[in-house]
Image: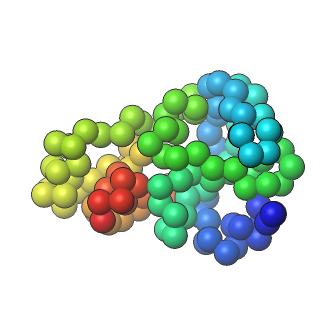
Amino acid sequence: MKTFTEFKSENELKPGGLKTFTKSVTFPRSGETIPAGTSLHVYFSEKIPSKVFFRGNSDNVKSILLVNAYKYFATGFTKPPGMKTLEKYSNDAIAKTPTGFKTEPDGYGEDNSPSWLLVMGLI
């Protein structure tokens, strides 16, 4: 298994800020648990726009799908938009990211988070 540093370099992870978990998360493969109230630096990747990445307790790479991130983090992530909103983003040439920034439909926000259209695999 790759260390976080190796994975970060290989997948060109870019920093997305400090986020705090609202509830405990247990990862099935490793059994590792991140307790509620833990603050972690999150990262985004242009190679894998559907996930948010962070370092686990043992320097392993952990990730959560961006469509589910709002369930686990106290602030900083929004619920996924509906199909009508995604169509509007596509037609208006302005989209939002899971962290609320405005960007181009195929772009990334100020915090390096991808547009919802990229997250959903529509672009």
Residue at (79% x, 54% y) in the render: 60
Q: How many marks?
A: 0
State the residue in front, 40 or 33.
33
Residue ranking furthest to the front? 29
From the viewer's perspective, is residue 103 above or below residue 26? Answer: below
Position of the N terminus, as image quadrant, is: bottom right
The percent coordinates of residue 91 (x first, y second) are 13, 57
Q: Is residue 102 visible?
A: no
The percent coordinates of residue 47 (x first, y second) are 51, 70
Residue at (61% x, 71% y) in the render: 12
| Relative horizontal placement of residue 48, taking residue 25 as reference (left or right) | left
Residue ranking furthest to the bottom? 10
Residue at (74% x, 46% y) in the render: 29
| Relative horizontal placement of residue 38, taking residue 69 as reference (left or right) | right
Q: Is residue 114 visible?
A: yes
From the viewer's perspective, is residue 61 above or below residue 10? Answer: above
Residue ranking furthest to the right? 58
Q: Quadrant of residue 81?
A: top left
